Structure formats: C-alpha cells, structure tokens
Amino acid sequence: MNQIEDLGLSTRIFWMLVMIYGSIQTILIISDIQDITATIQAASIVIFMLIIILMSWQMQFFIKTYAAQQNIKDEGIRNQQLHDYLASIEQQYTELRQFKHDYQNIMLSMTELVKHDDQTELQEYLNELKNKKHLNESLSKVSISELDHLKNETLRGLIIQKFFEARKQKVELDLEIEQDDLLIEKQLVDIVRIMGVLLDNAIEKAEEMPDHKVSCALIKTDDTVEISVENSVTLPFNLQKIFERGYSSKGSNRGLGLANVKELVNQNTNFYLDTQLIQQKLRITLIITGEK
C-alpha cells in the first residue's frame, strides 16, 4: 500500500477494480438473462476469478518493477545532484580565491592612500569600490554563510543542496539563523522531508517571479523551533487549496508535495503549520514544539 501511494498508482488500481467488479456483474446479469445453469455460471466465475488472481500477481510484479525503476531514476537524479554540487563547490572555491585576491589588492592600495593621507583620492576610491558590480556580486553569494550556526549535518546538507539547485535555476536562496548554535534533536527525518518540499516548491515558483528570490529562516526560542520558507507568488492566489492533493498551479498530477507536508504535520502532535499571504509573499512556517 505504501508503494502504491508513493508511486501514485492509487487511481489506476481503483479503476481496475471498478472494471473487474463491473465485469463480474455483467457475467451474472447475462447468466440470468440467458438462463445459464448454476454449474456453468459457477465455472465461468471460477475461471474469471483465476484470471483476476493472475492479474493481481502480475500487478504486484508490475508495482515492484516500477518501484525498482523509480529507485534507479531517483539514484540517477541524486548522482546528478552530487555532480552539480561538487561542480558548484569547485566554482565557489575559485570565486573565493578570486575575491581573496581582489580583497588583498584593495587593502594594499588603500593602505598606500592612508599613508600619504590623501583624503580626496581615498574618498574617490571608496566611491568607485561601491559601484564595482563584480565585488558586490561576490559578496552577495555568501548568502548561506550562516549555515555555520546550524549544527544538524542532515539539515545543513539539505540546505546546501537546495542552495545549489536554486543557483542553477538562477534563484537566490537567502538563509537566516538567529541562534548561534541551533540544534534540532528530534524527528529529523520528517523535518527534512517537509523542509525539502517547501524549498522545492518555493524555488520552482521563484523561477517564474521577477525577483527570483527565496528566503528561509530558522528560529529557536526556548523549546520551540520555527522554520519559515517565503517566496513571491502571482496574485490572486488561492491559499485554501494549496494543501489539497492534486491541486497545483502547474497543472494536474503536480500538487502532491504540500499535501504530503500536511499529512506529515498531522502525524506529529508537536508539529504545526502556519501559512500566511503577506501582500505578494507566501510564507509557510513549520512550528516544532518540545525541543530543548
């Protein structure tokens, strides 16, 4: 049942069962109309049931095969993500070296200006630095530097992966962690699943929006942790339907992620979900209580 649910085969199996039920009823109705003897009628039903059993066995084989194919596909996606991650790490390292080189040159040149006490030229130089686009871009790319404050390796890995996915889609992912040493000790599997869906949805939507921006904040106060994901949306926006299974602004068969989030939240008594639409910003907050 879990495989059927995860693979999205519930609808197909439902209609198959409806067709089987209709076929049995058709056999019974025709048998009554044609005055077929009970023996022949029973034999027909037994043969039909044997066919159904064979179909059921074939269906189980199909589900297992389909699940194996999906696992291979998912593994390929994970390998591609790992490749992109390593490539991005290499690119970040190169950019960091370039920025360090630029920074050293800037400091040396400013040191000389300070030595000669040339205030006019120093002011002009500072104004020029402010307008240097490539330096501003280098600084803005350090938008997940606050990850050092997050002490969960699983969450760190998830956020880093989503950061590079967003960057690949030309989406800016900003991270904010207010506490210096934020550690979540319980229910990490469900938290990672929920956070992954929220970030995926936000990044996918941010691709369409002019600002191309997603904000993620992790805040811990006393025994409560709040994880918020915010992105721009197109108005009018139906806030009531986004957690319905099958609903998606992208079309049919796309609205499964947030429905799964709702189910995971309902399964955990200390999980709460807060959804707000502030002007043109959709903010979804997972609230976790009972954390020390």
Image (cartoon, rainbow, N blue to C red):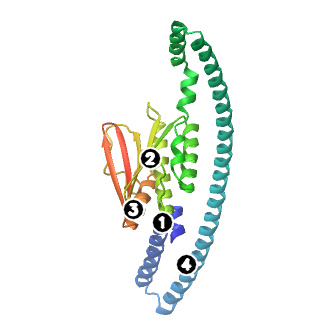
Which mark identifies residue 251? 2
| Residue mark closest to the camera, 4 vs 3 | 3
Which mark identifies residue 265? 3
Which mark identifies residue 52? 4
Q: Sequence-wise, which precedes: disc 1 or disc 4?
A: 1
Q: Amino acid at mark 4?
A: Ile
Q: Disc 1 and disc 4: Cα gap in Å?
A: 18 Å
Q: Are marks 2 and 4 in contact (CB under 8 Å)?
A: no
Which residue reaches farthest bottom? 39
Q: Disc 4 and disc 3: Cα gap in Å?
A: 38 Å
Q: Disc 3 and disc 2: Cα gap in Å?
A: 25 Å
Q: Is residue 196 visible?
A: yes
Q: Sequence-wise, which precedes: disc 1 or disc 2?
A: 1
Residue placed most toward the observer, 183 or 165: 183
Residue placed most toward the observer, 130 or 5: 130
Q: Amino acid at mark 1?
A: Ser
Q: Residues within 10 Å of mark 4 (few under 14, many from 20)?
A: some
Residue placed most toward the observer, 101 or 258: 101
Residue 280, horizontal then vertical, whole percent: 34, 37
